[in-house]
């Protein structure tokens, strides 16, 4: 990756980011940023499809407050989510309705076979979180870790592979809870100007989608401007590299689950053919919530 000339003054870099984020976000948030909490979540098809078996969906990692890196599933990539550190305790896990009820492919004669947990686990799961409109249950990592330990459910062996595709995982990116830090994480700018992605690393990076090509022209720092252009590509150009920006107009799939938790979308990005998404959200005002 060609070296990016860094901004010498940290205040200058901070001002460059603030200006760029104001362009991406448009109007100021409707509430005082200091009075609200913000977070970043990442979800993807490949994460759900190849989640099990693994070594971190166990009680101790799920309950730990210390952020951690997860194994890289995709290999080198300019905007790899596996460069983030995740807060597994505040990450979210949604169990599919048929999986919980033992119906459909999980029912009598179904091709999935018996669930790797019993009815007592399901009943306990339902006491932690009510069923959603589709009959699924959404729990935090720390809640799931407690239940796995209490019921002796082990998801590290080959038998857990059958669960792939039946749990939707929304990984919580570790941030300080402020909107600027959430935006730094979501735009991969948190490590500073020396780590900006060059347009040489992304195909179709000669222009962003409208109206972002014009709007991002106001970003004074050329490296930052090019970096953000690659996160605002047209959908068809973001199928293999880069991303497309949805703003607050639509939840990037499959992060729309967050709406049911009381989160409101601040900014969203889609990747690939909408197989992955990143959402910057404003957390609910009452923090006894999810």
Image (cartoon, rainbow, N blue to C red):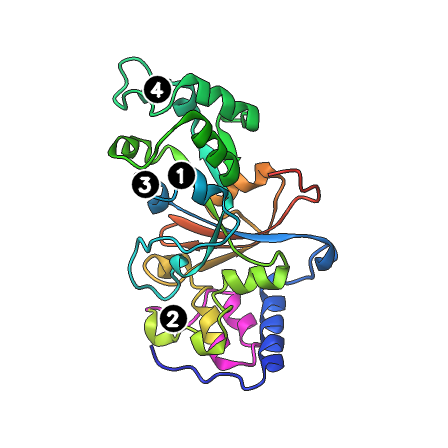
Dot 1 crowding, Cα within 10 Å, few <14, some 14–19, many 20+ = many
The answer for how far apart the CA atoms under marks 4 and 1 are is 27 Å
| Label number found at residue 205 | 2
Image x and y of residue 8, in percent: 54, 86
Q: Earlier in the sequence, mark 4 or mark 1?
A: 1
Upstream in the sequence, badge 2 or badge 4? 4
Task: Report which residue position mark 3 lands on.
Answer: 49
- Looking at the image, residue 272 sits to the left or right of residue 132; the answer is left
Q: CA distance from mark 3 to mark 2?
A: 29 Å
Give whichever of discs 4 and 3 has the lower sequence position: 3
The residue at 47%/36% (across/down) is 145
- Circle 4 SS class: helix
Residue 222 to residue 253: above or below: below
> Label 1's element?
loop
Front tag of 1 and 3: 1
Query: Where does the magenta region start and end?
Result: 203-224
Q: Which residue is mark 4?
A: 104
Residues at discs 3 and 2 in contact (Cβ within 8 Å): no
Q: Can residue 187 be seen here?
A: yes
Q: Mark 3, mark 2: which one is toward the viewer?
A: 3
Tag 3 or tag 1, which sits nearer the N-term? 3
Residue at 34% across / 34% down in the picture? 155
Point out the image quarter for the N terminus: bottom left
Q: Which residue is mark 1?
A: 58
- Determine whether, in the image, residue 76 is placed left or right of residue 223: left
In the rendered image, the quadrant that contains the C terminus is top right
Q: Position of residue 45 (x, y in %)?
A: 36, 44
Q: CA distance from mark 2 to mark 4?
A: 44 Å
Residue 222, magenta (yes or no): yes
User: Element under label 3?
Assistant: helix
Percent coordinates x, y for residue 275 in the rendering: 37, 48
The residue mark sitting in front, 4 or 3, is 3
């Amino acid at each position: 990756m060609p070296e990016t000339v860094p901004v010498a003054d940290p205040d200058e870099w901070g001002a460059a980011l603030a200006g760029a984020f104001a362009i991406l976000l448009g109007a100021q948030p409707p509430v005082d940023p200091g009075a609200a909490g913000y977070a970043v979540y990442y979800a993807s098809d490949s994460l759900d499809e190849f989640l099990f078996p693994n070594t971190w969906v166990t009680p101790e990692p799920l309950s730990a407050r210390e952020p951690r890196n997860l194994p890289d599933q995709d290999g080198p990539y300019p905007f790899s989510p596996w460069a983030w550190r995740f807060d597994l305790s505040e990450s979210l896990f949604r169990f599919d309705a048929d999986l919980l009820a033992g119906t459909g492919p999980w029912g009598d004669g179904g091709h999935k076979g018996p669930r790797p947990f019993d009815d007592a686990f399901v009943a306990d799961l339902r006491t932690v979180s009510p069923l959603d409109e589709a009959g699924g249950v959404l729990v935090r990592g720390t809640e799931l870790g407690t239940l796995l330990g209490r019921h002796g459910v082990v998801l590290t062996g080959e038998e857990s592979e059958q669960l792939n595709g039946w749990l939707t995982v929304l990984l919580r990116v570790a941030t300080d809870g402020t909107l600027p830090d959430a935006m730094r994480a979501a735009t991969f700018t948190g490590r500073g100007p020396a780590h900006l992605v060059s347009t040489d690393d992304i195909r179709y990076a000669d222009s962003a989608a409208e109206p972002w090509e014009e709007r991002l022209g106001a970003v004074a720092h050329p490296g930052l401007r090019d970096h953000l252009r690659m996160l605002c590509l047209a959908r068809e150009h973001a199928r293999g590299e880069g991303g497309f920006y949805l703003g607050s107009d639509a939840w990037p799939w499959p992060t729309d689950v967050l709406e049911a938790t009381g989160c409101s979308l601040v900014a969203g990005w889609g990747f690939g053919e909408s197989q992955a998404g990143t959402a910057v959200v404003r957390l609910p005002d009452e923090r006894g919530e999810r």
